[in-house]
Image: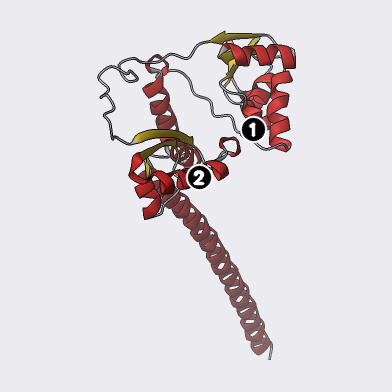
Amino acid sequence: MVSANRWLAMLVVLLVLAVALGAALSWRTHGDRADAATRQERYGEVLAAAEAEVTAFVNMRYDRPSESVDRVAEGATGAFRDHYVRSAITAAYPRLGDSEIFFYAGDDDIDRVPAADVDIATLWVTAFAVAKHRATPRKFYLVQDYEPMFYPAGTQFALAEESYRLGLYALCNTDNLAKVYRDEYGGRSWSFTPAVDPTVFSPEGRPERRPGDPVTVFVYARPGHWRNCWELAAPALELLKRRLGNGVRIVTAGSWALESAEARDMIVR
């Protein structure tokens, strides 16, 4: 009887151990599946990001270079991002090719930006970051245009205008901008005159217009920018072309606006 009870107890213990082992294996399998699902999800996100980056890189548009560059830069990470941005800087400013590059991601990172001799803001949104950067004693603002007018009256107009009141020393494109910065916003400014490369932009060698040749009308057209008044310019160009036909040649520069075959016949880009 004692022997039978002993065997029964051992059997119960073995059953308990088997159940515990099964539960442990089941829990581990479930955990492995969860980990695998997490890894699969992350892998999918990585693939999606890589696909978007390759698509942006392959589909660079010559007619929209700034948008294309920005799209690639937004998705770039690690060494590729550094190489991509560095190559763009080197193309424009060869002597800065070996300079240190720090990617500023927002206000939380502003104190991590290394100290420098000079900070230069180049767009109104960067002026606020320059004003907050405490590690640099001298701060400048390259004012290339009256940027509030990039937008209709509203929040962005007000913020762009406010950037002129941050106390940054302005380096202004033309005397008129420097005067506006000083007189209307109380800032200090210096101006420069934009240079023109005569080997590219020159009337020399231009053919003379012959009697009967169409009149050329040049239009700076940027439909995505409110202040360029494309809503007025487009119907005016259509009316002009309908009235004069082959007597007028319309040339535009800026960005694509009309994609139709009719538009391509009317406007030479």
**Residue 167 or residue 64, whichever sits in front:** 64
From this view, report whether residue 83 is shown above or below residue 116: below
Residue 225 visible? The answer is yes
- Mark 1 highlights which residue? 106
Callout 2: SS: helix
Q: Residue 24 falls in which quadrant of the image?
A: bottom right
Q: Position of residue 239 (x, y in %)?
A: 47, 47
Residue 254 place in picture, x, y as percent? 45, 35
Residue beneath label 2, please?
Answer: 234
Left or right, 208 with reference to 56: left
Q: Residues within 10 Å of mark 1 (few under 14, many from 20)?
A: few
Q: Earlier in the sequence, mark 1 or mark 2?
A: 1
Say what amino acid the circle numbered 1 marks: Gly
Could you tell me how far apart the alpha carbons at marks 1 and 2 are, in whole angstroms? 39 Å
Disc 1 vs disc 2: which is toward the camera?
Answer: 2
Where, by quadrant of the figure, is residue 118 drawn? top right
Image x and y of residue 220, in percent? 47, 33
Secondary structure found at label 1: loop
